[in-house]
Amino acid sequence: MGLIADIVIGLLAGWITGLVRRGRGYGLLGNLVVGVVGALVGDFILGLIGFVAQGFLASLITATAGAAGLLYLVGLVRKRTGEPSDR
């Protein structure tokens, strides 16, 4: 899909990830930004291994997984640096 579609799907993925993580994210705006970045990262990583998400649902799943993975990695980095957790 195109960049605009990735952004829209990323916004949806960030919202979904925020619902799933219930309070362990970065607020609505932060989760939406993470969703967009996660969508782009997810598309990039799938492209590297030779897969391309075809269709809305596949792109949404990829973006949500990317956003969740990104939030997980950010959480690990925050724990290591000693920043207060958001829980």
Image: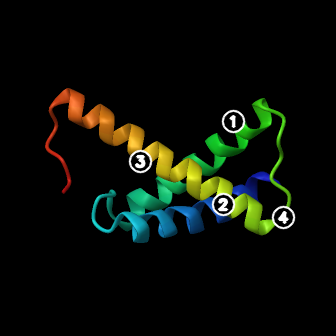
Front residue of this view, candidates 37 and 75: 75
Q: Which colour scheme is used?
A: rainbow
Label annotation for residue 45:
1
Q: How far apart are marks 2 and 3 (CA)?
A: 15 Å
Give me the residue at 27% from left, 65% from top: 23
Looking at numbered disc 1 in the image, what kind of residue is underneath it? Ile
Residue 13 as seen in the image, left or right of residue 6:
left
Task: Give the mark nearest the N terminus, 2 or 1.
Answer: 1
Is 20 drawn above or below residue 49 in the view shown? below
Q: How far apart are marks 3 and 4 (CA)?
A: 24 Å
Label annotation for residue 71:
3
Q: Name the residue under label 2.
A: 61
Task: Give the mark nearest the N terminus, 1 or 4.
Answer: 1
Query: Where is residue 33 drawn, in percent x and y?
Result: 49, 54
Q: Mark 4 points at which residue?
A: 55
Task: Give the mark nearest the N terminus, 1 or 3.
Answer: 1
Judged from the image, the secondary structure of the residue bearing numbered disc 2 is: helix
Is 75 drawn above or below residue 27 in the view shown? above
Q: How far apart are marks 1 and 3 (CA)?
A: 16 Å
Give me the residue at 84% from left, 64% from top: 55
